[in-house]
Every structure is written in structure tokens, then in C-alpha cells.
Amino acid sequence: MSKSEVDRSKNYRRIRRRDLLAGTAAGIAALGLGRLPGSVAHAIDYVEAPAKAVGISAYQDGGHVFVRWNNTIAIGYRANQSLKYPYFAPLMGPVTGLSLTTESSLPYPHHRGLWLGCEPLNEGDFWSDGSLQTGQIRSTDLRVESANDSVVVIHDACEWIRQQSSPLKDRRRFAFSVPSERIRLLDVEIDLTAREDLRIDHAKHSFFALRAAADISPIHGGTLMNSSGAVGAADTFGQPASWCGYFGQRDRSDVVEGIAILNHPDNFGGDCPWFTRNYGHLSPSPFNFLSTPWVLERGATLALRYCVVLHAGTPQQADLEGIYKQWVNGDGWFISMRKSSTGQFAGPISSALEKE
């Protein structure tokens, strides 16, 4: 090897060593390991749980809101603007801590937990996976509106947009409460305002929807039941009902848990049959069963109200019928707020649920 070649080799080794040291230092800094021994850290340790670790608390991180119960995630709302639509996942069972919903499971992995969507809607697809240009429900004003010892209220506003068109905008509020150790409630209030004339002739995929976890879905051993006591998709599909949901024995557990949607009787003028499937999908929506087109004129608003119940035990053991009657008669959180003359919190459903 010539002298010039030897010099080049030495220079190359020096450069490699310098780059290696610089890369290692950057990696240590990124991991937060760059403090010298004896330097002061800004974070402190806790010798006991913080006060907010007990009961309900909420945490927002950009386009996500997580609600905790006793310092464990109870529900999550995901509204990042890169998503097809905002959705809830997970929604944890009150006893096992296992999610009662699923996202991205077969069949139809575009189903995400608990969500609002529609396809087709004025030639847009606001439901399935694919290009956001074909349709997207974009969150524009997500925030934790209020949080106290009884309830967390989440507010969001969304624009339904596609290729230089925006057929809808909506305002949505969710109130999460835990009236007992075996019941959790998500009170739902959604107002949709048409930005252009809307017409739906038929839409199998439409509006408020749920995708249940596999272990409580009928094809995996769970049970689908509605308020009339009908069981399975064959007997619940296309039928009106006050509520409908799934329940079953949880995976690797002998605990029975379930999730149900309570449908307010004023939704869609009281004409609201259910779309149900044994693989774990349901939706209280009339659009698959229309005999005449459904229209919403530009500027008009459609108000929808639901209550999602996460419960331990069967629907009978959880007394879903009793919860429904209380909710419809004015004991739901949002309904109580509207009826309260003071405008102060009137409390979620509670008294009848403490008997478990």
C-alpha cells in the first residue's frame, strides 16, 4: 500500500470514529440518558398515587382523548386528522379491563370500534378504508369540555369533506360516567347540519355503528340480543328495538360482559330499524330499509341521541331495560342538563344501578 493510500485509510477511520461517536451521543440524548451523574432531573417520583388517580380523569394528547377510571384507561377517542373518521377505541369492560370493541379485525377491517359514518352520501364514501379524497370526516375542534368527579364531557366538531365538496358538518358531545362498578355509560349527542341538499336512496353502511370484540360476537360464541329478547342477526335484522347489543364470556375468563347501544325514540322520527350482523357489527339506522329516499335540505339539522352501555353480566342482569327507561325519561346526562333550570350538572343515571 502506498503512502497516500495509508493516509486515506487513516483519515477514513478517523471520520468513521467521529461519526460513530456523534451518532451515539445523539442516541443517548434522544433517550434522555445524557445527564451527568449528580445532575438534577426535573421530574419527581411519587411515593403514593396522585389524587386524580382515583375515579374519573381525562387526558388529551393532540387528536386523542383518553378517559381513565382509577388510573386505568376506560375509553379512548381517536380523532387525528389523518384518519378516515374519528372513533372510540378501546371501550373497556368494567370488570375484566378487556375492550368490548375491536378495530381492524376480520371480516371488514375498516370497522373501527364505535364510530359515525356513511356510504354512499352525495357520491362520497365516509365509511370504508381508501383515499381520503373520496370522503373524510375531519375533526376540527376536539377538546375535553369538562371533567369532574362524576363525568367527563368530550366535545368535537367535524367537517365531512370530499374533493371540493362538504355535504355535512357536525357537532358531537360525549359524556362518560361510572354509576357503579359494573356499569359504564357513554351518553352521545350528535347534531348534523347539511351544507348541501342531501339525498340517500339506500345506504347499507350508515351513521352510528359498533364493531364488537370477537369474544362477545356470535360467530365466536357470544350473543346478539335486542330489547324484545330476539337473539341473533336473523331475528334482529331490520327490526325496531329500544336497544341492541352483544355480550358473552370474555376471553381467558369466566366473566360475562357486554356492550349495547340505546337508541333514542326521536332518532329519525321514530322509524329506526337495526342493521345487525353475527360477526359483531350493528347500527341503528333506517337507510338500508328505505322505501322512499331520505332527504335533508341544505341548512337543516338532524339531531341524534344514543347511550352506549358497557356492562358486566347479561343484559337482564345489567337491567338494560331499566337503564333505557331512566335515560329516555330524562336521567341521561345531556337530557338532565337540558331540563335543569339552573344549568348545573344534574347527575348521570345512578340510583337504580347501585344494587349490584
Image: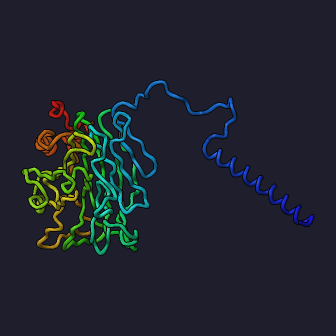
Side (left or right) of 36 relative to 274: right
Q: Residue at x 80, y 57 (%)?
A: 13
Nearer to us in this view, 128 or 337? 128
Check the image and tell me how it is coloured: rainbow
Q: Quadrant of the N terminus?
A: bottom right
Q: Position of residue 197 (x, y in %)?
A: 26, 72
Side (left or right) of 241 relative to 199: left
Q: Residue at x 41, y 50 (%)?
A: 64
Residue 341 visible from this viewpoint: no
| Residue most extreme to the front | 1
Q: Position of residue 132 (x, y in %)?
A: 40, 68
Query: Total of numbered circles in the picture?
Result: 0
Q: Quadrant of residue 137?
A: bottom left
Q: Quadrant of residue 301?
A: bottom left
| Residue most extreme to the right | 3
Q: Position of residue 25 (x, y in %)?
A: 69, 47
Q: Quadrant of the C terminus?
A: top left
Residue 30 visible from this viewpoint: yes
Q: Residue at x 79, y 57 (%)?
A: 15
Q: Position of residue 348 (x, y in %)?
A: 23, 38
| Residue most extreme to the top | 47
Side (left or right) of 10 relative to 54: right
Question: Is 89 drawn above or below residue 8 in the view shown?
Answer: above
Question: Is 114 drawn above or below residue 121 in the view shown?
Answer: above
Question: Is 332 drawn above or below residue 292 in the view shown?
Answer: above
